[in-house]
Image (cartoon, rainbow, N blue to C red):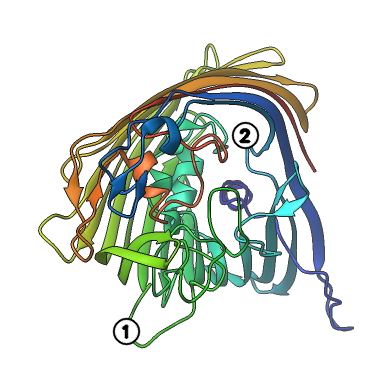
Amino acid sequence: MKYRIFKAAVGLASCALASAPAWSQSNVTIYGNLDVAVDHISKTQGNVTGTVFGMNGTTPVPNSIASPSQSVTRMTPSLSQQSFFGFKGVEDLGNGMKANFVLEGGIQLDGGTLTNDGRLFGRQAYVALTTQAGEVRLGRQASPMMIAYYLGTTDRLGSSDLMARGLVTNSLQMFQDNLLTYAAMKGPWVVLASFSPNAGVPSQISPARSVQTPTTPPSTPATGQILGGLTAGAESNDHRGRTFSAMAAYSTEEITLVGSYQRSEMRAPMGFVSTTGFVPLVKVDSYRGAMVGAKYKFAATGTVVGANFHTGTFNFEGPENPKVNTYAIGVNQPYGNWNFVASAMETKFTNFTKGKDFGAVIGFDYNLSKRSALYMRSGYVKDERGRIVRGVITPLPISGGPTALLIPLGANEIPLFAGAGTNMDARTTIVSFGMRHSF
């Protein structure tokens, strides 16, 4: 039972359509989740004059042009929960041993496209051997940090789940390439340890993606790419991208306690893309992040409350190492077929720009069945720009809170509110109604 619970929590739902040898039999399952909403996004005018964002060469661009107020109604995927499809299979080898595999890809229902830089199985693609001493997996996988957040959140890790804000401080905390993982489960305890020679750090870190979007250019050797990008996980002899991660959780019907740690060697310049190509701002030597979380369910009412804290530090080759602290709380209250949810967060640079982001979300799910639900989410995020600092390699001014700053620099792959982004020193609000179905 504990093994099945753990497999579900990790988001394991994937396997390959391959025929088994005649002398063995493999049980293959197709699974997934589909989530899409219609939302209305409003942003107030940002304040970027004097920073690298909104600059034309060395000339500041007026805020009304560089970061205007915006309002749009759109169809948005993965708002309350990430959409994915997958195949998973298992073969009983006898003597308590099993061979299994997972192939899982993310999908955006608004356009029928793939996520994770267009990869068919961009979420997970691994083989594993389960023994009485634990399980060993090899391939692209959900990181121990992401599994910790899955276990600790009171919502569903969709883009409106503010309890996940610390997770997206660095996108390598979500999915990692080239991962070797050992998992051990005993009673209510789950322990994970993993290593990757390159979890997804490119030679130049920027917001460029494999496919051009309205806000980002296509990635090339000249532009660099986001952390975790399509080809970012290529191994090199300088230990770029080498990552160590671990997680421990104690989980019962009433209480969940979880903690996770990650260290990634970066060894690459971070910057933005201009009309002339990649512009480096700083050299990032490494990144380390840690989180602790707790969740409690009141048996009498079914109320679930949770809280977590995340701290992440980018080690720059320069005078300051930006440190991001994130605090989040959440609650989930069931009532018949209804679930009422709320979450709030604060994430801030404790040094560096000293920029901050505050946010809150409320909503509900109406469960049509065990697999289908209608939902609503409404919330806001407010960015405080903080002070202006200078790039070390290229001394251009930099400012903004973690959400507004780390996305344009390529550290964060999944923006808040599923691609809505956040204007610097401005307020972003959302109202959404959607549906999800699991299979």
At 36% from the left and 74% from the top, the residue drawn is: 242
Say what secondary structure mark 2 lies in. Answer: loop
Residue 212 placement: quadrant: bottom right
- Direction front: furthest residue: 59
Please tell me whether residue 326 is drawn above or below residue 366 in the rendered image.
below
In this image, 118 relative to 297: left or right?
right
Q: How many marks?
A: 2
Circles 2 and 1: CB atoms closer than 8 Å: no
- Dot 2 or dot 1: first in sequence order is 2
Please tell me whether residue 346 is drawn above or below residue 389 in the rendered image.
above
Please tell me whether residue 118 is drawn above or below residue 107 in the rendered image.
below
At 32% from the left and 37% from the top, the residue drawn is: 48
95 or 306, which is in the foreground? 306
> Which amino acid, mark 1?
Asp
| Residue 330 visible in the shown view | no
Task: Check residue 79 in the rendering and tell me which mark sits there, or answer none.
Answer: 2
Judging by the rendered image, the residue that carries numbered circle 1 is 238
| Residue 192 visible in the shown view | yes
For disc 2, the neighbor class at 10 Å (few under 14, some 14 to 19, many from 20) is: many
> Which amino acid, mark 2?
Leu
At 61% from the left and 61% from the top, the residue drawn is: 117
Compute the Cα span from label 2 to label 1.
38 Å
At 49% from the left and 52% from the top, the residue drawn is: 413
For disc 1, the neighbor class at 10 Å (few under 14, some 14 to 19, many from 20) is: few
